[in-house]
Amino acid sequence: MSEKFSLNVNGKAHSVEADPDMPLLYALRGDLGLNNPHFGCGLAQCGACTVHLDGHAIRSCVTPVSAVGDGKIVTLAGLGTPEKPHPLQAAYIEEQVPQCGYCINGWIMTAAAFLRDNKKPTEAQIKDALSGLKCRCGAYGAILRAVKRAAAMMG
Ligand code: FES
Ligand code: FES
């Protein structure tokens, strides 16, 4: 049975009516029209659906909308602006990372949470933090260069 949920997304309050078990991803994309988090596997295996919940990277495809509570959600759209991009967004452009672009959301949102808590990470630490993400286009080398570039900007 549907219930009403208040979601704080990118600093704005939204009301969503949904089954409590509905994935947060569906609320973000279907109800709020926020299309940065993508549906990839739906099984917490690829990271395409990643958003931040109270600063932590979570996989919204397996997070029930009822589990969010008063938590603050940030999507890729809330990370930076065209005028003031997040260092990762700037680095992605500088390194010309995207091919099809489907995976970008997962890599940037996961790396953003990691870099915020880990200044000056080693390459091994970056690889470890991003090890659960997939890029079907195989842009792994460019992704690593971009994350290292952003780490240098943020460190
Ligand atoms: S769609 Fe959520 S991890 Fe793949
Ligand atoms: S750029 Fe296509 S899946 Fe990563």
Image: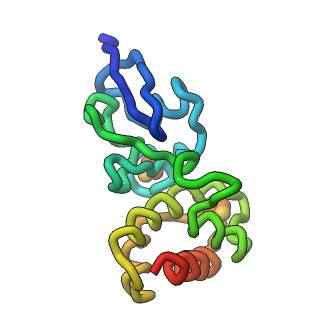
Q: Looking at the image, which is closer to me, 10 or 141?
A: 10
Corner quadrant of residue 132: bottom left
**Percent x, y of residue 51:** 44, 49
User: Quick check: can you spot residue 40?
Assistant: no
> Is the C terminus in the top left, top right, bottom left or bottom right quadrant?
bottom left
Q: Is residue 152 above or below residue 38?
A: below
**Percent x, y of residue 63:** 33, 40
**Percent x, y of residue 2:** 34, 12
User: Quick check: can you spot residue 119?
Assistant: yes
Residue positioned 42% across, 71% down in the render:
115
How many numbered tags mark residues here? 0
> Is the N terminus in the top left, top right, bottom left or bottom right quadrant?
top left
Residue positioned 35% across, 54% down in the render:
55
Residue positioned 58% across, 58% down in the render:
103
**Percent x, y of residue 33:** 59, 30
Q: Looking at the image, which is closer to me, 81 or 124?
A: 81
Q: Is residue 101 left or right of residue 73?
A: right
Residue positioned 70% across, 76% down in the render:
95
Q: Is residue 41 above or below residue 134?
A: above
Q: Is residue 109 above or below residue 152?
A: above
Corner quadrant of residue 100: bottom right
Residue sitting at the far top: 1
Q: How is the image coloured?
A: rainbow
Task: Report the image quarter containing ligand 2.
Answer: bottom right
Q: Is residue 118 above or below residue 20?
A: below
Residue sitting at the far front: 83
